[in-house]
Structures are given as C-alpha cells and as structure tokens.
Amino acid sequence: MDRPIKKKTFTPQRIALGVGIIAFLIFAVNTLLNGSQSSLNVNREKITVSQVTRGVFDEFIVVTGVVQPLKTYQLDAIEGGYVAQKLLDGGATVKQGDLILKLENQRLMLDFVNRETEMYDLINNLENTRLRLRQDKFTLRKTLSELDFQIQQAKNEYDRNNKLYNDRVISQQEWEKSKNTYERLTQQRDIEVENQKFQEENSIVQIKQLEGTLERTKLNLSMMKENLANLSVRAPVSGLLSRVDVEIGASITAGQNIGQIDDLNGFKMRVEVDEHYISRIFPGLEGSFEFNGKTVKLIVSKVFPEVRNGRFDVDMVFDKIPDGVRRGQSVPVRLQLGKPADATLLATGGFFSDTGGNWVYVLSADGAKASKRNISLGRKNPQFYEVLSGLEPGEQVITSSYENFGDKDVLNLQ
C-alpha cells in the first residue's frame, strides 16, 4: 500500500537562502559598528611602528663642522709684478719674515731711479744756492769795505773843505763838489746794503723751498724703497703656509691674494647651519662631537649673519682641543638649541611629510588595526618629536610614510 512521503526540511534551496540571509546580517552589523569609516588592508612588514615614550627631550640639530685654524692670515701682494722666484710652497712651516716669493717690476724700478736722480739734482741746487749766498755775503763785505774807505776819504776831504770854505779859502763850487761826493758815496752804501739784504732774503726763501722739496722727495724715495722691498713677499707671521696660488712667470696685480698662512696655536670649528635656525643661534650655545672615542665640547663664539644658498656660517671654539685634530677634518657636530626637559616623545619618520604632524595612525590594543587620531606636536630633533597632546606613553604609532594609505580611516594590519 502506499506510504506518505515526508518533505525534507533543509533543501538545498533553503540552505542557500539561509546562508545569504546570514551574510547580509553580518554585513549590516559590521556597517552599523564601523559607521561610515573606510578601511584598507596593510602588510605589517611594510610599515614602521614606534612606541610613544616618556623621556628627556634634548633639542639639537646635527650639522657638519670643519676644523679650521683659530686665526688665518691672507697673503696679499702689496705691489704688482711678475713672479721671478718662488722659494716656498703650500704646506711649509714658516717663521715671521721668511721669504716666500720674489717679484720684479721694471716700471717701479725706473720710477725709483728717476726719483733718485731728481733728489740728487735738488741736493745740488740746494748746495749751489747756499754757496751763492755765502759768496754774496763775502762780496757784500768786500764792497762795503771799499765803500767805507771811499766814504772816509770823502768825509775827510769834505770836512777840510768845509773849514776852508768857512775861512773863505776855497770857492763854493769846490766845497759843494766835496759835499756831493761824500753824500753820493753814503747813499750808495745804503743802497748796496739794502740790495744785499734783499738778495740774502731771497736766497733764504729759495733755500727753504728747496729744503722742503728735498724732504718730500726723500720721503717719496723712502716710500718707493719700501715698495721695492714689498716685491719680496715675506711671511707676516709664523705659522703654516697652507697655500700659494702663483707660479714662476705669473703676473699679479697689487692687492691680489696669493696665499694663506694659518696660525698653528689653536683651532676652531666652522659649521654651516640652515637659515631656518638663524634666529635661534647665538654666541654661548654649546655643541659636541665624538673624536677618538671621546666627547669633545664646543661653544658658539661667532655667528655670521650673511645667508648664502640658504645657509649661514657659525664659528665654534673648543673647550679643550683634543690630540690629533687637524685642519680640514670634517665631523658631524651636535649643536644644542635649548636645555633638556621631560616630555612625551614620538620617533621621527616619513609620516610627518604626509600629515604635517596633525594626525597619525594609532594601533589598537590587540595590534590588529590602526585608526586615525588627531595630535599636536611641538619641537623636533633628529630622533624625536615632542608630543603636546593626543598620545600617551605606551601607545603604538605608525611612523613610516602614509603615502600609499590615501584617506583611509582604518588600517587592517595583516
């Protein structure tokens, strides 16, 4: 007889329908839980995760320093000419006054010879004028002596004739003749004295002028001798002749730099700093670098305000010069910008260029996800940022570049 057939409860159609309903419910619940957040799956091995810590924030920058002499003297040519001899080369140790170069300048030599000839001419003119003055004095004495003799004779004759004329012995004409002769000779003597006085005064003026011209000529000649001496280029100080930039036969001009001498009694460190820090660098700041396993301290001594190619120079002096340091050595210098202070620290990384330090991806407690979080950063050194708000010590933060994450809110770490 026939038996009734029971219908199956779980048919394939019903199973498929149930699975679809369950998947839809899971999607709906996940959407409700995550709201409108977008996510991205990220390979954990391709990111850098750093832990937020609490420690001492030391604000500094690392710059490249070059060891230089404490003092450097530029060797300039005082007079121009061509190089006839080169006695010392760069790298030689020199003492003050050592001869380095010999120059020749024919024009300067000719000027010196002409000026020397002019001086000798002036000396001859001066001596001739003095000799003429002495001769004129002798001539005056001789002329006056003769006039005085003639005057005395004329006076005697006049006195006799005056007595004879009063006694009516001689005529008036004869008396007047003797009188006129006496007066003419007396006047002639006065004129001769006045003429000789004028000649003497004129000669004295000429002598003074010649003496003044001679002194100036001697001074010029002395200066020209010094200029000729300057054709021999000597070391102005003792030290290391670090360079000589000319060769034999080269023509150089007055004032041209031809070399450099370094003072070996001390060294300094010259560093270049980015112009961004120009308002924060001042004398007295400290720095340091590692040399032969020891920390060497430096102090900023001078700041050069001129900015070239986005950088400016700073001179730093050694607290104690270490043994073995040499001119031209280049070392990384840690330049302090402020005093150390306790702070919340986050390691530096490529994330800053993508977010400007305004937000970061913070890992969840289980490390499976990383979510966006707004933060605030302060100062920076080559190792850490100072965290002002938004992060707590112990939290994990992705500090590598966010370039490939787009604008995703959540990163699923796999």
Image (cartoon, rainbow, N blue to C red):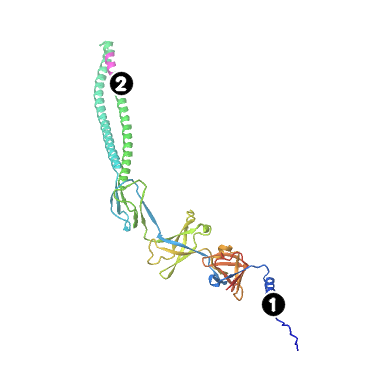
- Residue 289, percent from left and from top: 45, 66
Q: Is residue 142 visible?
A: yes
Instruction: Give me the C-alpha separation between circle 1 and circle 2.
Output: 169 Å
Which circle marks residue 218 in the picture? none
Amino acid carrying mark 1 in the image? Gln
Q: Give the labeled residue for mark 2.
A: 187
Determine which quarter of the picture holds residue 323: bottom left
Stretch in magenta: 176-183
Residue 94 placement, left or right of 51: left
Judged from this view, the residue extending furthest toward the bottom is 1
Quarter of the image with the N terminus is bottom right
Instruction: Give amino acid for label 2.
Output: Gln
Q: Residue 42: image x %, image y %?
A: 57, 70
Mark 1 or mark 2, earlier in chain: 1
Q: Quadrant of residue 385?
A: bottom right
Judge whether residue 162 is colored magenta.
no
Camera-near label (1 vs 2) is 1
The residue under the point 29% across, 13% down is 176
Above or below, 107 against 167 in this view is below
Q: Horizontal and vertical percent for residue 105?
A: 30, 44
Q: Is residue 179 above or below residue 76?
A: above
